Amino acid sequence: MIDIHTHIGRGTVKEEPVFGIDELLKRMDELGIEKAVLLPRGVSPECSFFHFDTERVLEVYKKYPDRIIPFCKLDPRNGNNSPETDFKWVLEEYKNEGCKGVGELTANLYVNDERYKNLFRQCGELNLPVLIHFAVSVKYGIYGAAVDKGLGQLEEVLKEFPDTIFIGHAMAFWSEISSEVDEEKRGGYPEGPVKSPGRVCELLEKYPNLYGDLSANSGYNAISRDPEFGYWFLEKFQDKLLFGTDLCHVNQEVPIVDYLRQAVEKGKISEIAYRKIIEENARKVLSL
Ligand SMILES: [Zn+2]
């Protein structure tokens, strides 16, 4: 299995024990995860006091090259907060050191902000996928690239940057698995049956450059809130989904591993779909 989404380092809560590389590797062994994408943590000031930056990710990668797939951090406001910042030389340096993608992006600007667009264009030119934490709007108290209900701003960038691979993550993205989206709940974990496929399904179908990151509660909730719909979704979008955990805390529960295993054991999804979701799609998207 390849996990598309993990972090290590110190969290935002004072008392929280540090989740370090030893803890991550132990959990990976327990869960049967061979390799994990290690994302920098707290990459934008919105998220955290403590940053785990690209240089530290690369140090860990050099120590465990068979287990860790490094991503680099960039905030679209880095440089001089301009839509014309040259990110390419930085991206090239990180790519040469082994980074396979950029993210997770957490700056709380609209995803079609000119500064995000400038970064997306340059990531596409260097074949570096971007992993985005989506948020419901630009406001106090949240982090992530903002997108309105219906994901219109995401569609705009998917269309404008066909050479950039976008990996969607978090609540504002996964709430749109259903066509019924409640403005009040779309920043959380909407429950209950999915009456008909939503904008996430439409965009995954229409844009070859969009993938879904199944990590965290947001991804797990999306595929399990209505199990029959979830199985259909996994089978239907078997080429566009990436298994992930968002491991970042000590004693974190990760129900998705068993959920996917049971889905294939019970014959709810095909062995082929399962293999793609847990590993093969990641190999393709990250050029492993
Ligand atoms: Zn994350």
Image (tube, rainbow, N blue to C red):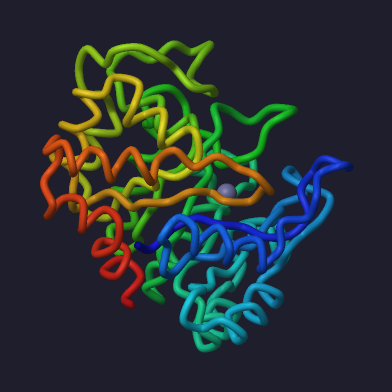
Q: In this view, does 9 lie to the left or right of 242?
A: right
Residue 188 in percent (x, y) is at: 53, 22
Q: In this view, does 274 lie to the left or right of 143?
A: left
Residue at the far right in the pictured view: 14
- 152 lies left or right of 284: right
Residue 147, x across and y down, in percent: 48, 32
Percent coordinates x, y for residue 278 in the rendering: 30, 56
As displayed, is residue 203 above or below residue 88? above
The residue located at (53%, 69%) in the rendering is 71
Q: Quadrant of residue 53?
A: bottom right
Q: In the rendered picture of this protein, how many numbered marks are placed on residues?
A: 0
Q: Quadrant of residue 195?
A: top left
| 225 to 34, vertically: above or below | above
Q: Is residue 129 in view? A: yes
- Is residue 205 visible to the viewer in this orientation of the structure? no
- When asked about the image quadrant of residue 258, the answer is top left
Image x and y of residue 235, in percent:
14, 41
Q: Which of 111 and 38 is in front in this view?
A: 38
Give me the residue at 38% from left, 73% from top.
Answer: 125
Q: Tell me the residue at 53%/49% (across/down).
A: 246
| Rendered-image quadrant of the C terminus | bottom left
Question: Looking at the image, which residue is at 67% across and 82% down?
Answer: 59
Quadrant of the drawing holding the N terminus: bottom left
